[in-house]
Amino acid sequence: MIILTAFAIGLLAAGTRSLICYLMTPWLIITAFALAAICSLGNVSLLALGLAILASNAGMAATFLIALVVELRSEA
């Protein structure tokens, strides 16, 4: 669930086409994990944090690839 949410956040951040959104996405994910670690009585998985950051980057990359394909199709 965390990976799907991070992927969706990456898709939406790339849709804004703002450099600040690109930079804020991983920072917000890290902040959410840090708050979860502070408030949680159990452990917080660093592997899940890494996968969430990778998933948000994959979401951004997917948005860019879709935009590239759409642009190439419109030129043809």
Image (cartoon, rainbow, N blue to C red):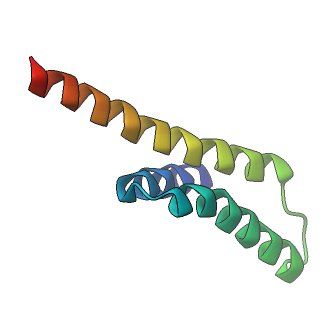
Q: Residue at x 78, y 74 (%)?
A: 36
For the image shown, how many numbered marks are present on the structure? 0
Horizontally, residue 68 falls left or right of residue 36, namely left
Q: Residue furthest bottom?
A: 39
Horizontally, residue 3 falls left or right of residue 32, namely left
Q: x and y percent of residue 23 in the render? A: 62, 57
Q: Quadrant of residue 57?
A: top right
Horizontally, residue 6 falls left or right of residue 46, namely left
* Above or below, comparing residue 23 to residue 47 in the picture: below
**22 or 66, nearer to the observer:** 22
Q: Which part of the image, by quadrant, shows the N terminus? A: bottom right
Horizontally, residue 1 falls left or right of residue 16, namely right
Q: Residue at x 84, y 82 (%)?
A: 39
**35 or 12, nearer to the observer:** 12
Q: x and y percent of residue 75 in the render? A: 11, 22
* Above or below, comparing residue 14 to residue 43 in the picture: above
Q: Quadrant of residue 20?
A: bottom right
Q: x and y percent of residue 16 in the render? A: 38, 59
Q: Residue at x 9, y 17 (%)?
A: 76
Q: x and y percent of residue 21 in the render? A: 52, 62
* Above or below, comparing residue 35 to residue 30 in the picture: below
Q: Residue at x 20, y 22 (%)?
A: 72
Q: Residue furthest top?
A: 76
**24 or 34, nearer to the observer:** 24
